[in-house]
Image (cartoon, rainbow, N blue to C red):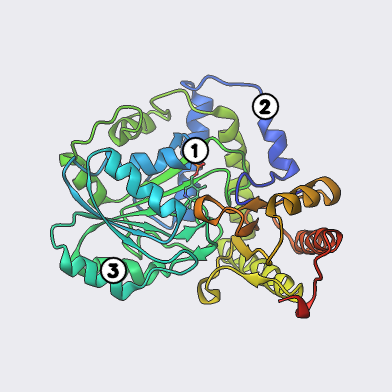
Amino acid sequence: MQLRIPGPTPVPPHILQALSQQMINHRGPGFADIIWRVTQRLKQVFQTQGDVYILTASGTGGMEAAIVNTLSPGDKVLSVSIGFFGDRFADIAQQYGAEVERLEFEWGQAADPEMVRRALKAHPQVKAVLLTHNETSTGVTNDLGTLCSVVGEFDKLLLVDAISSLSSIDLPVDKWGCDVVVTSSQKGWMVPPGLAMVSVSPRAWQAYATAKMPRYYWDFAKARSFLEKGQTPWTPVLSVFFALDIALELLLQEGLPNVFARHARIADMVRSGIKSLGLRLFADERHASNTVTAVANPDGLDNKQFLKVLREQYDVVLSGGQQRLEGKIFRIGHLGWVEDKDVAEVIGGIKSALDKLGFKTGVSAR
Ligand SMILES: *Cc1c(COP(=O)(O)O)cnc(C)c1O
């Protein structure tokens, strides 16, 4: 089966085996060895000298942690959203009482750094900026390096959702000055859902010292003091820890530049495969993501029917569109454990399913 949704992603057999390991004492020396090793390796992938904490949560828990540990109710926040997950980040901040200024871009487009600069000039009271590195709902990767340098001109706290990019697309956290960066295990990390990983810069710790949003489970200071003992404050999802330990070994063995290059190459193959079928990419191609490709549905295609035929008859599982993009696009995840042969199978499956439904594929089909 080709599970090609933008998370959960397939898990290599070697890592699957780690998941069947017997439970251990999460307050014992065996777990301390694992969490210290995993944290050190995560720092290499985050490219940071700062702190990295591992929370038992899906990605959204990590986003919530980023907000409640650095902000107070009433703080002004600039949310830069290019899609569904950008909106979610803003919603979380709003729910906890932040005053959210929303800068929104058309879905399918990247954020324009000049507009961000203007918004920051217009709203000098802004304390933090919320950015999405890779917008999974639209298949767009923001030019995060440039956006970070714009935010840097104003010396604001920078909170980044890199859930579907970190470990697959280059994100040098320290170099770009990101204060809290969030990712989660079921995306590019080749492990099951269950862990959110967050980096915390010295400046984020300064913000923590005065931040008054309510927090308990997500409290970074608790995570810090328990990590010193080789533990987490609450019982961690041990099995996913075992898996992440092996996955990080594989990632670092392949080498980060090679991992990024593989994702770029595969994404390129996916995009040209889609175009060769006469289909249209949804995202602005200058900012097309290397981890997820959104494809505009051809006119008259019943999206649900198409995904069903693809799944039942060709063993390829893809995602539809979210919220306002429901029925308008379908999405192919190509992150984590993905190789050239997978692309051929997915594109072949799409072609067969479209043929079956009477849609002419090929350059003439638009
Ligand atoms: C997957 C994802 C999330 C979080 O989703 P969870 O279901 O909570 O793991 C948030 N942002 C982006 C960009 C994502 O891709």
Give residue 71's position: percent from left, percent from top: 22, 43
Question: Is residue 14 at all visible to an observer of this figure?
Answer: yes
Q: What's the mark number on residue 58? A: 1
Callout 3: few (<14), some (14-19), or many (20+) C-alpha neighbours within 10 Å? some
Residue type for callout 2? Gln
Residue at the disc numbered 2: 21
Residue type for callout 3? Val
The secondary structure type at the circle numbered 1 is: loop
Q: Residue at x 72, y 34 (%)?
A: 17
Residue at the disc numbered 3: 116
The secondary structure type at the circle numbered 2 is: loop
Give residue 9's position: percent from left, percent from top: 65, 47
Q: Nearer the viewer, residue 64 or 40?
A: 64
Examine the image and state in which quarter residue 80 appears: bottom left
Examine the image and state in which quarter residue 18 appears: top right
Q: Is residue 154 left or right of residue 87?
A: left
Give residue 165's position: percent from left, percent from top: 51, 57
Q: Nearer the viewer, residue 328 or 12?
A: 328
Q: Is residue 219 left or right of residue 237?
A: left
Callout 1: few (<14), some (14-19), or many (20+) C-alpha neighbours within 10 Å? some
